[in-house]
């Protein structure tokens, strides 16, 4: 049986992967969520992968799958840019009383 489709679910969005015959891998170029995964359960986004073969059989794995596969499906997003702030108060015309 040959795998016909592979889909990945991240943050509620499903993405289809494409088979690359040269590398013999299923691939996609995706954008990670734009916020840190720190506030997510376990501090990671759960990635679920579902493969379907030509007979219609499906297999699924996610971060809750035991072992190395489950651990590999944990997407950790860390912030790399320092936050910036703009001071808006006190406003113009304020008088400093000492």
Image (spheres, rainbow, N blue to C red):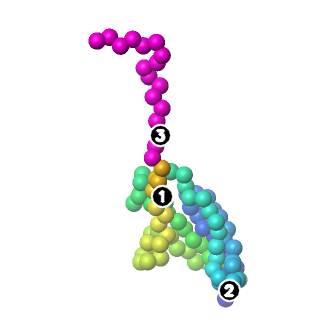
Rendered view: 54 above or below 78 = below
Q: Where does label 3 land, which residue? A: 84
Q: Is residue 89 magenta?
A: yes
Q: Is residue 88 above or below residue 56?
A: above
- Cα–Cα span, label 2 and label 1: 33 Å
Marks 3 and 1, how far apart at CA: 19 Å
Residue that numbered label 1 is attached to: 77
- The tag earlier along the polypeptide, 2 or 3, is 2
Label 2's element?
loop
Q: Which residues are magenta?
A: 82-98
Tell me where residue 59 sits by quadrant.
bottom right
Q: Looking at the picture, how far across and down is residue 92, in whole percent?
A: 48, 16
At 54% from the left edge and 52% from the top edge, which residue is drawn? 34
* For residue 65, side relative to residue 54 (left or right): left
Quarter containing the C terminus:
top left
Q: Position of residue 62 (x, y in %)?
A: 50, 70
Q: CA distance from mark 2 to mark 3?
A: 50 Å
Q: Secondary structure at mark 3?
A: loop
Name the residue: 49% across, 70% down: 73
């Amino acid at each position: 049986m040959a795998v016909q489709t592979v889909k990945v679910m991240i943050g509620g969005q499903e993405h289809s992967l494409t088979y690359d015959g040269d590398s013999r891998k299923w691939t996609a170029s995706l954008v990670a969520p734009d916020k840190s995964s720190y506030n997510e359960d376990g501090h990671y986004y759960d990635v679920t992968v579902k493969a379907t073969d030509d007979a219609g059989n499906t297999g699924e794995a996610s971060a809750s799958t035991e072992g190395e596969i489950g651990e590999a499906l944990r997407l950790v997003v860390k912030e790399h840019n320092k936050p910036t702030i703009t001071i808006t108060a006190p406003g113009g015309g304020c008088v400093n009383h000492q």
